[in-house]
Amino acid sequence: MSGLNASLGYFVALVIFAALVRTLLKKWSQLSFVLEFASSFMLVGCWLEVQTIVEVGQWAGGLGPDVTVTMLFVVLLTHGVVCGGASGNPNQVVLRFLQLEASILPTLLSVVSQFLGAHLAIHIAGYYWSLELTDMHMIKNLMASSCSTSLLVSLLQGFFTECVCACIFHLVHLNLRRRSALIRVPLIAVLLTFLSHTASVFTSAYINPSLSYGLTFHCPGFTLTEYMVVYWLGPLTGMILGLLLYMGHIPRIFAKNLFYSNKTRFRAPKGDKGEKKKV
């Protein structure tokens, strides 16, 4: 139980940091890329600890799969509440760019900030594990240099898994983005938890380039290029497919609708041509 208490303290510290950044910069929309930095930092940092519980918590801390799934859902739910519009996901930033909702410079700044946040989270988590506050963290610290990769299948299977999961996620996200946060945030958290748990024997369905960079790119087993194909190109392809299925076109690239007609399904009934004019 002490291992879980230490993890909860770590989670709270990351959440407080992200909440402070959002509070301080809420009025400066031009600094939204800093919010993306904090969002990515929180998400990667928390998920690294969840991953630790998955890998060693069951036999070092008595924490079963039910605990890890619950903690992942709570992390995703808290991230959605605290970070608001800052997704911490480069693909969602690129999606806004493709929808003509953002220009090139803010998009680039946000993507770079997200990867910087993920990179910092790796170092912070490593320092936290090096403190060896519990047996679980002591073992994780010993395993840090030889972590287990999340990619457990071939490149083709991994690419297909990330692509399909990303397509499903973005379709749901696009359909929910106009809904109230009270509906959207919990549903997105449930969906991401379900996808991650279902795909845990394939790629873990990170569908987030900065998240996958922080969680598995430093693990041996595959080259950087192979990881990029699965965890960057796969989700990007799925995002583009999701946008095409949702809108029928990509506004930034072409305006022609490939799937849907602009005509309304139902036409208003025309008036009787022989109707007499009122006097």
Image (tube, helix red, strand yellow):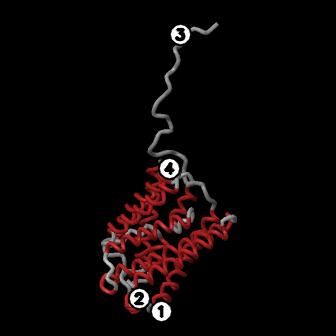
Camera-near label (2 vs 3) is 2
Which residue type carries mark 4? His
* Lower position in the chain sequence, tag 1 or tag 4: 1
Is the C-beta separation of discs 1 and 3 under 8 Å?
no
Is the C-beta separation of discs 1 and 2 under 8 Å?
yes
- On the question of residue 243 being in view, the answer is yes
Question: In the shown orientation, is residue 168 left or right of residue 176?
Answer: left
Residue at the disc numbered 2:
137
Camera-near label (1 vs 3) is 1
Q: Identify the element where label 3 is drawn.
A: loop
* Mark 4 nearby-residue class (10 Å; few <14, some 14–19, many ≥20): many
Q: Identify the element where label 1 is drawn.
A: loop
Residue shown at 49% from the left, 34% from the top: 264
Residue at the disc numbered 1:
131
Residue at the disc numbered 4:
249
- On the question of residue 145 being in view, the answer is no
Residue at the disc numbered 3:
274
Placement of 116 over or under 187, stated as above or below: below
